[in-house]
Structure formats: C-alpha cells, structure tokens
Amino acid sequence: MAFQYTVGIAGSTGHTKICAEALRASGQFEISWVLTPPPQPIGRKQVLTKNPLHLWAEKHGFVVHFVEKKLRPELESQLTQRPDFLLVVDFGYLVPPWLLQFPRIAPLNVHPSLLPRWRGSSPGQFVLLHGEAESAVTIMVMGEGLDTGPLLWQGQFTVDPTWTQTEYYQHSFQLAAQELPKVMQHVATGELKPQPQPENSPTPIAKRFTKEDGFVDWKTLAVAMKIKKPDHSELTSQHPSQLLKEVQSSTQGSWAQTIHNAVHGLSPWPGVWTLLPTTKRMKRLKILSVHIQEEKLLLDKVQLEGELPSTWNEVQKAYLP
C-alpha cells in the first residue's frame, strides 16, 4: 500500500489509541513510530502493565520508543524516521521545542474543549464541574505555550447531563477521530490554514487534581441535602475543598448543584467524599451518585470506608443516630 503521509504518535491512553487507529484505518497514514511510557506497576500486586497505546502498537507491529520521566534531547537520534506529522494525544509530558520542530509538516494535538476555554490537563472535568451545556473538541497545531497554538478544527457538541468525565472524553475523542484523517490531509495540501486563537482564555487553567479536591465537609453537604446541621464540635473547622469553593463562587449556583456537578465531573477520579460522623467514629464516605429534586440534593449510591457500595438509606439506618 502506498501511504500519502507518515506520522509519529505520542500518547498512552485509550483516547490516543482511538485517534491512532483512525489514522491507521484510513489507509492514508503510515505510523512511523509510537512514543509512550514503559509498562507501569499497577494494582496491589504492582504488576507491570502496558498502556493501551503500547498494546495497540505491538498488535500492529509499529516501532515503540519509551519515555521515562521526561523527553531528553538524545531521544531525537533514536527516532527511526522523521515523520510528516507528530500527533500528541493524552501524552502527559512537556513536549520540548526539538520535538515540536521534528515533523516535516506540523505537530498536532487533540484537546477536548472549546479552546480558548479550559486550557490545561483536565478540560472535561472542568466543563462538567461548571455545568456547561455545550462544549467541543479541538484539533490544533502545537506550540510551546499551554494549549495556545493555532486552531484547525473544532467539533461542537451538547453535553449530556448524565455524563461523567469518562463519557465526556469518550465522546470527544471519537468525534475528533472521525475528522482527524481529513483534517491532516487538508493541512498537508494547504487547503486548511491554522487560525490563531485569542491570547487570553476566559477560563482558569484546568489543573490536575488531588484527592483533596473532591472533599466536601458534612455541614455543607447537610445544607445541600436540607437536613439538620450536625452538632459536632470537631466539624467546625472543616470546609469544602478550595476547588469546590471556587466552582461554587464562579457559577453562583447552590451547593446542591455544585456537589451534583462535582460527583459527575470528578468521577471516577478523584471522586467526591466527606467525613461522616457515625455513631462510632468519623468515617470517610464516598458519594458515587446523586440527583436533585426540588432544589434538594439526594444521595443515591455511596460507599462507606471498609464497606461495599450501598444506598444512602442503608448507611443512614446502620450508622447514623
């Protein structure tokens, strides 16, 4: 088969695999090599596990180059071919200038937001956290700034209110993958010209999360649920995480709505949780699913530390006074 263009792919996740497979299946692109982290220890037994892109590359016989902690300059001499394109999707590493300049035509990136909105590593989570009804996925030319490069294509879509970040990203990357081969061909032929995006973003940087970002104190949760505030002196110094306070302030929504959005946007990681004053002691409670009825937050599925997931009603009966 005579390929029109060559491409090097940098990434690691199933989202990278979706985009890479779209290029392979189109018959127009030869995969020069794949750049990805080596197998990582996973789970309690710390079993070395290959990531989805690595497995995909091995299945199709593509050359794989591993990246450890960062992209070092000596890697350039190891890359077996200088491709027409570099495609970066869910890579997780800072791409240095030498790699941005390595492809003959352009370095491209797929970013799941309506740029210049939500630049950063967690755009989908922030779309859901802020309850935005519309979003997009962007194909862009990479630059040295954080998601500031010129735009090539944006596919807008309606955000399903039932989505967690898992469904948001799956939809975004599948939508981009459908257009990616055509967009890249049009870039190569000069039919599609990159359009500069505004220098400033109307939104903060969509930062990476920590476990603490999902914390909501029991007093605030009780207010959202419209139940009597707990009278526990040890709870007086607890407050929602800084992230949730900033979201609530930015959206000017109720705490019921903010927590509802957080349960969707922060699932599965880092998740929303609280410290529940049970009849025995304070216990961590994961909030797995919720809904709002008459402006009141109702907990559906929860998980108390040391227990299997259950309903909130079951936890109330067993552990609350």
Image (spheres, grey):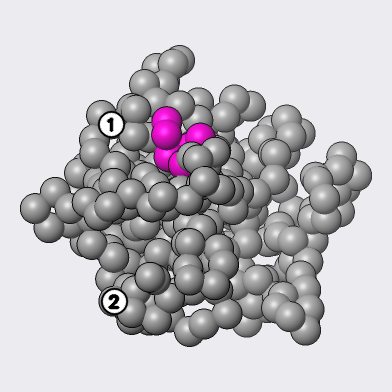
Q: Position of residue 313 (x, y in %)?
A: 29, 76
Disc 2 residue type (three-letter): Asn
Residue ID for mark 2: 313
Position of the C terminus, as image quadrant, is bottom left
Q: Which span is picked out in magenta?
A: 240-246
Q: Nearer the viewer, residue 107 or 247?
A: 247
Instruction: Check disc 2: other Cα within 10 Å, few if <14, some if 14-19, many if 20+.
Output: few
Is 267 magenta? The answer is no
Q: Position of residue 204 (x, y in %)?
A: 45, 27
Q: Residue at x 38, y 52 (%)?
A: 230
The kind of residue on which mark 1 rests is: Thr
**32 above or below 86?**
below
Residue at 34%, 57% in the rendered image: 264
Q: Return the x and y of residue 236 as percentages of the image width and height.
A: 50, 40
Residue 315 figure quarter: bottom left
Near-viewer residue (292 or 266): 292
